[in-house]
Image (spheres, rainbow, N blue to C red):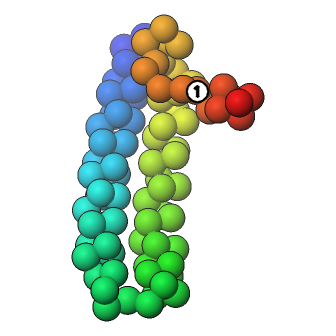
């Protein structure tokens, strides 16, 4: 049980760090919006944002699978697919 709690804590911390990076990078790209074409902006999102989102997904999936449904504050992925 202690190992699981540690893993949950590690994944929650890692997810928080990735989300913070995402917010920073999105703000950087958006600040360049006036100087970037739509294609250049899309390429930046593809190169920077998509990998960070994939990384966030790994941590979020682990947390969703291992945190009790009663404690999970967000819609579960399988519930979103049912909508």
Q: Is residue 47 visible?
A: no
Is 59 on the left or on the right of 19, as rendered? right
User: Which residue occupies 46% across, 18% down?
Assistant: 72
Question: Farthest residue in the right direction?
Answer: 82
On screen, 38 above or below 56? below
x%, y% of residue 34? 31, 86
Where residue 78 sits, quadrant-wise, is top right
Which residue position holds label 1? Answer: 76
State the count of labels.
1
In the structure shown, which secondary structural element does the residue marked by tag 1 occupy? loop
Frontmost residue, 69 versus 82: 82
User: Which residue occupies 40% across, 28% down?
Assistant: 7
Frontmost residue, 64 versus 42: 42
Badge 1: few (under 14), some or many (20 or more) residues near its Cα, within 10 Å? Answer: few
Is 35 on the left or on the right of 4, as rendered? left
User: Which residue occupies 48% across, 55% down?
Assistant: 53
Frontmost residue, 2 versus 26: 26
On screen, 14 above or below 54? above
x%, y% of residue 69? 53, 13
Is 81 on the left or on the right of 60, as rendered? right
- Which part of the image, by quadrant, shows the N terminus? top left
Q: Is residue 44 visible?
A: yes
Where residue 6 sits, quadrant-wise, is top left
x%, y% of residue 10? 33, 34
Question: Farthest residue in the front direction?
Answer: 34
- Which part of the image, by quadrant, shows the C terminus? top right
Is 27 on the left or on the right of 56, as rendered? left
On screen, 43 above or below 56? below
x%, y% of residue 75? 54, 26
User: Which residue occupies 43% across, 21% down?
Assistant: 73
């Amino acid at each position: 049980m202690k190992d699981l709690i540690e893993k949950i804590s590690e994944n929650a911390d890692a997810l928080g760090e990735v989300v913070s990076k995402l917010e920073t990078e999105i703000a950087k790209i958006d600040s360049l919006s006036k100087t970037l074409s739509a294609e250049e902006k899309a390429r930046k999102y593809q190169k920077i944002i998509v990998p960070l989102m994939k990384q966030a997904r790994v941590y979020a999936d682990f947390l969703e699978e291992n945190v009790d449904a009663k404690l999970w504050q967000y819609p579960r992925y399988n519930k979103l697919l049912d909508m």
